Image (spheres, grey):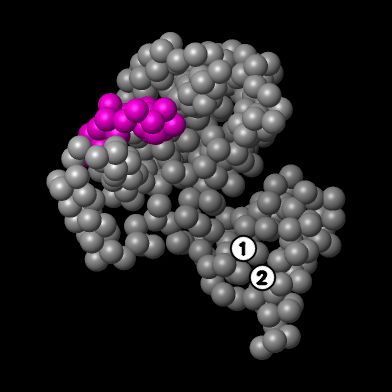
């Protein structure tokens, strides 16, 4: 779901020299070709590097503003406005993000507003305005076509909010607010703080419906930070409950993709097929088992 996708790229996966060369190249483009149509695109791509990789949020704001104001390309203009909202959220200023989105939405014809309306729901949710987010999610579900790229994600998010906020008591609402606060910390690249809040929420409210998801999100953070042993241990604790198929799949993928341990990966992939035969993940798991088995035979 796009609402829970981590926007940041691990710096450990980027070669420092290549990053420096990229900055030098874009600086050269912006210096030598300031008046061409390439400049807004260059500003946008430079903003992406600053936002997603180096976490230079102030620099990203400058680049995305230059892209938004310097282009006549509608798609680029809207993408830059959307990214400006993301960066303001990352800086802990969701109010400015909402101002940008509301102003841009008001300036557009109805048929061009949908993507920014989706982003507005995302920002409202992260800002803690959950009732408003739910109102606009309901509006979007009614307005979006089922063929729209965002429809399934919006529908899923609305169901998520309904289940864990709208239909629960005040204690349940407080648990959900904690969950959203941890999600906001993730969007600010504060992984350690987010992980601590996820774990604290699950420990404080172990019977809450969202407690298992909090533990899953905490384990994901270990995986994203490269703490694979800790991630495997955390996912293992979830591998016998409602999140069992998802947790077992993550363990298999860590062994498969991160640790290159195909024997352990196969063991966990087979666990999914044997213990969660009705899981939606069964088919891709079968496909990956066939690939690993074929690779094993060739070697």
Which residue has dot 2 on it?
A: 265
**Residue 257 seen in the figure:** yes
Residue for point 66% across, 88% down: 299
Answer with left or right where residue 86 lies relative to residue 249. Answer: left
Residue beneath the point at 34% across and 28% down? 72
Determine if the magenta segment contains residue 288.
Answer: no
Residue in front for this viewpoint, 270 or 76: 76
Are circles 1 and 2 on residues that touch, CB within 8 Å? yes
Residue 81 lies, in percent from the top left, at 37, 27
Mark 1 surroundings: few (<14), some (14-19) or many (≥20) residues within 10 A? many
Magenta segment: does it hold 71?
A: yes
Q: Would residue 178 be visible to someone looking at this image? A: no
Q: Position of residue 197 (x, y in %)?
A: 46, 38
Q: Which residues are magenta?
A: 58-86
Dot 1: what SS? helix
Q: Is residue 140 above or below residue 202?
A: above
Q: Residue at x 51, y 21 (%)?
A: 112
Q: Which residue is mark 1?
A: 253
């Amino acid at each position: 779901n796009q609402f829970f996708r981590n926007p940041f790229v691990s710096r450990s996966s980027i070669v420092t020299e290549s990053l420096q060369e990229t900055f030098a190249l874009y600086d050269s483009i912006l210096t030598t070709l300031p008046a061409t149509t390439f400049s807004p695109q260059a500003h946008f791509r430079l903003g992406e590097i600053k936002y997603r990789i180096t976490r230079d949020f102030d620099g990203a704001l400058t680049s995305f503003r230059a892209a938004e104001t310097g282009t006549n390309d509608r798609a680029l203009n809207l993408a830059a406005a959307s990214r400006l909202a993301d960066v303001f959220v990352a800086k802990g200023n969701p109010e400015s993000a909402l101002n940008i989105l509301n102003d841009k939405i008001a300036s557009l014809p109805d048929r061009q507003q949908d993507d920014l309306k989706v982003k507005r729901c995302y920002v409202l949710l992260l800002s803690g305005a959950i009732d408003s987010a739910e109102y606009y999610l309901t509006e979007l579900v009614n307005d979006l076509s089922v063929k729209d790229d965002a429809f399934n994600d919006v529908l899923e998010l609305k169901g998520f909010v309904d289940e864990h906020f709208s239909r629960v008591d005040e204690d349940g609402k407080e648990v959900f607010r904690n969950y959203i606060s941890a999600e906001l910390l993730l969007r600010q690249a504060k992984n350690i703080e987010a992980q601590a809040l996820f774990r604290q929420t699950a420990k404080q409210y172990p019977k809450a419906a969202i407690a298992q998801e909090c533990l899953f999100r905490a384990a994901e953070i270990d995986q994203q930070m490269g703490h694979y042993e800790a991630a495997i241990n955390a996912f293992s604790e979830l591998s016998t409950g409602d999140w069992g198929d998802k947790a077992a799949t993550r363990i298999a993928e860590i062994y498969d993709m991160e640790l290159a341990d195909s024997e352990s990966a196969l063991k966990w992939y087979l666990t999914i097929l044997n213990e969660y035969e009705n899981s939606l993940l069964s088919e891709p798991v079968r496909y990956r088992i066939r690939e690993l088995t074929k690779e094993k035979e060739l070697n």
